[in-house]
Amino acid sequence: MKKIILTGDRPSGKLHLGHYGGSLKNRVLLQESHKQYIMIADIQALTDNFDNPEKVTSNVLEVMADYLSVGIDPNISTIFIQSQIPELAELTIYYMNLVTLGRLQRNPTVKAEIQQKGYNDSLPIGFLCYPISQAADITAFNADLVPAGEDQLPMIEQTNEIVRKFNGTYSSNCLKEVEPLISNVRRLIGIDGKAKASKSLNNTIFLSDEASEIKRKVFMMYTDPNHLKISDPGKVEGNVVFEYLNAFHENKEEINELKAHYQRGGLGDTTIKSILNDSLQSMLEPIRDKRLSLKKGELLEILYNGTRAAREVVKEKIEEVRDVIGIKY
Ligand code: TRP
């Protein structure tokens, strides 16, 4: 039996290089050897966009197009939309009883997001609880593996706590623990040098960006502020150009030579940016081309079919869960 993968993305914008390095590449690599479910997490996206649902709904098909463009094959991977499987919301409700407020507040990813969004006293409960809903997504499919970026580790840890608590409370082995698969691009920094590339910080390169836009962003990248003259020695740590070369440039030997040259001085920012630009352009051009060939009707059909298939799986699981709790009349 193939191992099961469940992953997903919030459709609050198009997908970018952070998604690609963190999880999408792995999903493409693993889709043949695993049974893979990919969820467009529109309900989760609403937890921080409830007052702007348009932002979520208008990006659902964009994310679907991103998936197909990078090589997710809908004939082997099941792509579905969260909101059309109400059983996931039901499962979330049962899990809510098993998690304390204090535990949610300690989730480092959620904590960082709360700070970044400046919620302070106006924190919506729905947002605080999204890790519980994510645990429902993962366990509903009996997932073994979640390929994701480093920021998802706390979600997986919390999922496994819920699994143990549920199984213990209801004396069952109904739920399965899951493992993360963190890629070697653990966390992609933003083009401005900020800790994380994200749509809301406006510091990312989208998979669908035009060639000229990619170039503009590469040449804007934060490097080493003390590397003023070409002859000056430069720093590679925290230097966005080198971080992106590490993440996406195929030739590791060339990267090492460039790093050594930059560190001893004599290598200009324009040169390294040109090399990165060439490498990103050749990686993203076929993805952009594939995207142009996709039709809206085709994307919708894939979404409907995937959701129908995924819902069958979840319905079976929810029956089991009700049974184990004893909700049977
Ligand atoms: N939290 C993920 C994000 O921020 C989206 C997501 C929802 C997810 N459910 C998931 C990821 C289950 C992996 C597994 O984009």
Image (tube, rainbow, N blue to C red):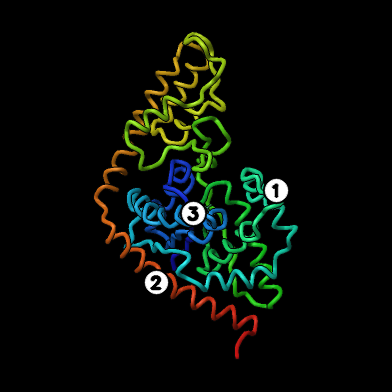
Q: Position of residue 271 (x, y in %)?
A: 40, 18
Label 1 sits on residue? 120
**How far, Cα to Cα, is label 3 from label 1?**
23 Å
Q: CA distance from mark 1 to mark 2?
A: 40 Å
Where disc 3 sits, the SS reads: loop
Task: Check contact, mark 1 vs mark 2: CB within 8 A.
Answer: no
The tag on residue 290 is: none
Is the residue at mark 3 in contact range of ligand 1, meaning its CB lies under 8 Å from it? Answer: yes
Classify 71 as above or below 322. Answer: above
- Report which residue position mark 2 lands on: 309
Q: Position of residue 286 (x, y in %)?
A: 29, 42
Q: What's the amino acid at mark 3? A: Arg
Question: Tag 2 or tag 1, which sits nearer the N-term?
Answer: 1
View extreme (front): residue: 51
In the displayed image of the protein, which residue is found farthest to the right? 102
Circle 3 Cα neighbour tier, 10 Å, few/some/many (<14 / 14–19 / ≥20): many
> What residue type is disc 1 on?
Asn
Residue farthest bottom in this picture: 329
Q: Nearer the viewer, residue 114 or 34?
A: 114
Q: Is residue 82 above or below residue 328?
A: above
Splitting the image into 4 quarters, where does residue 38 fall? bottom left
Amino acid beneath label 2: Ala
Indicate which disc, 3 or 1, sits on the residue closer to the N terminus. Answer: 3
Question: Which quadrant does the C terminus fall into?
Answer: bottom right
Judge the density around disc 2: few (<14), some (14-19), many (≥20) Cα neighbours within 10 Å. some
Residue 180 % position (x, y) = 56, 54
Q: Position of residue 83 (x, y in %)?
A: 47, 66
Q: Based on the displayed image, in which of its 4 quarters is residue 254 positioned?
A: top left
Mark 3–mark 1 contact, CB under 8 Å? no
Q: Secondary structure at mark 1?
A: helix
Q: Which residue is mark 3?
A: 10
